[in-house]
Image: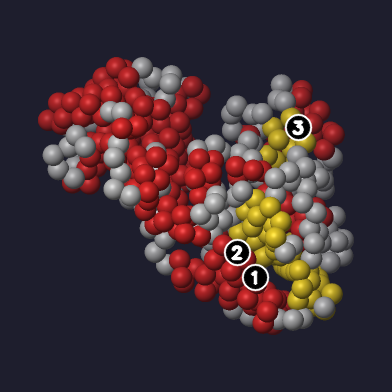
Amino acid sequence: MENPRRAAVAALIKQEQDGYANLVLRHALDGFTGTARDRVFLSAVFYGTVERMVTLDHILQKFLQKPLVKLDASVRAILRSGLYQARYLKSVPVRAAISESVTLTRQMGKSSAAGLVNAVLRRAAAYDLTVEHYSNETERLCVEYSVSPQIAGLLQTRCPDQCEDILKASFTPPPLCVRVNTLQTDIGALEEEFARQGMATRRGAVPDSLYVECRGDVTALKLFKQGLFHVQGEASQLACAALSPRPGDTVLDLCAAPGGKSATLAQYMENKGTLVSCDAAQNRLTLVGGALERLGVACGRVLHNDAAVYNEAFAGADAVLCDVPCSGLGVLAKKPDIRQKTLDGLDGLVRLQRAILETAARYVRPGGRLVYSTCTLNPDENAGIVRPFLKEHPEFRTRSVECVLPGTTKDDDFLTLYPFRTGTDGFFIASLERL
């Protein structure tokens, strides 16, 4: 039987080589031949270790004579995953976490490091982090909430009143939410289908959003393969609701990959009109096309296009969505590898966001609508982009969006969804119209 701990360590080594955590785990699971229970354990160890990496490294370093980064990659991954199990996985006794890590060290041909792994994990597992003396507040936030100094510092500076609440909430992923495909079914019928399979559901605040209690992979369900729903957080659905395209509209989704928002927009359009789904990443267009095909979207076209560069063919659109690339600080709970980002290139990212909004605005016909959205909570990427745009473009004004999600913060018609208030991904939404 394949060892889930060994598979998790192999995935951690791969992820450290600059792989995206979700893609690395998917690849690991695709090649894993263990039981369903072992697959769950593999996922928990891998994601948990990535999520707590900064904290784990801080503790481990206290009991190492040389920098952790100087250790063999396999030994480093074994130490990290072993300490994660010992400190955070309640289902694994501390002794078992340590002994299994030592055994794994030998199995992976690193017997000379077995003594080090045993000694370091015993001391690190027992270390009381509550007595830690930090050099400053930023270091405390980094260690307690397992984020890079750059992320901690940015949140301290730009979100001083919400900083710690944001970080606390980053350890609690939002519950699974799906979007009912109204082109194929309705919410009542889908609720009945889930109930037949023993899955409880509850309706979200956004129409046709549905929270589902599914212990396994929801995308493996026949209902998913039949195109009756797609997985989409309620915050993302709210961005589409803010645009609310109508049947017959010409609609642009300028940063469409992987395609979830395009699918939701098509549902608002009732499959009537023209939906153009674009992305600058050629290799991600197949994701968009595949999603639209599975869901029965007939009004859509998928195109390779740089959202920051004007395309005359798109002029005269009724509704434009620019869900722009961002720092992702609102989805730390779902994408744990973001926690270690240094935020290098943030200034360039902000310039790109401005360029996309400026370009998108040129496509909107008089009377048309434009939504700018992000999954970050950094004000510089949110209101800091839209407010200057509105000052420079008096032909645009904000549109009021009904705050259908309890806890949503509204400021000058801008919506900010803080996870600790809404229980969703962190999100920013600005809905505009051209006069």
Q: Amino acid at mark 1?
A: Val
Name the residue nearer the viewer: 169 or 52: 169
User: Where in the figure is residue 172, as x and y percent of width and height?
Assistant: 54, 37
User: Where in the figure is residue 222, as x and y percent of width and height?
Assistant: 69, 33
Q: Mark 1 — residue?
A: 386
State which tag comes first along the sequence, 3 or 1. 3
Q: Mark 2 — residue?
A: 382
Q: Amino acid at mark 3?
A: Arg
What quarter of the picture does the C terminus occupy? bottom right
Q: Kindly indicate whether the residue at mark 1 contacts the one at mark 2 (C-beta within 8 angstroms).
A: yes
Element at label 1: helix
Q: Mark 3 — residue?
A: 202
Q: Determine the CA span between mark 3 and mark 1.
A: 34 Å
User: Where in the figure is residue 119, as x and y percent of width and height?
Assistant: 18, 26
Q: Residue at x 67, y 82 (%)?
A: 392
Q: Kindly indicate whether the residue at mark 1 contacts the one at mark 3 (C-beta within 8 angstroms).
A: no
**Counting other residues with Cα less than 10 Å from the Cα at mark 1, is it few (<14), some (14-19), or many (20 or more)?**
many
Name the residue nearer the viewer: 117 or 272: 117
**Counting other residues with Cα less than 10 Å from the Cα at mark 2, is it few (<14), some (14-19), or many (20 or more)?**
many
- Asked which quadrant contains residue 252, the reply is bottom right
Q: Residue at x 50, y 24 (%)?
A: 36
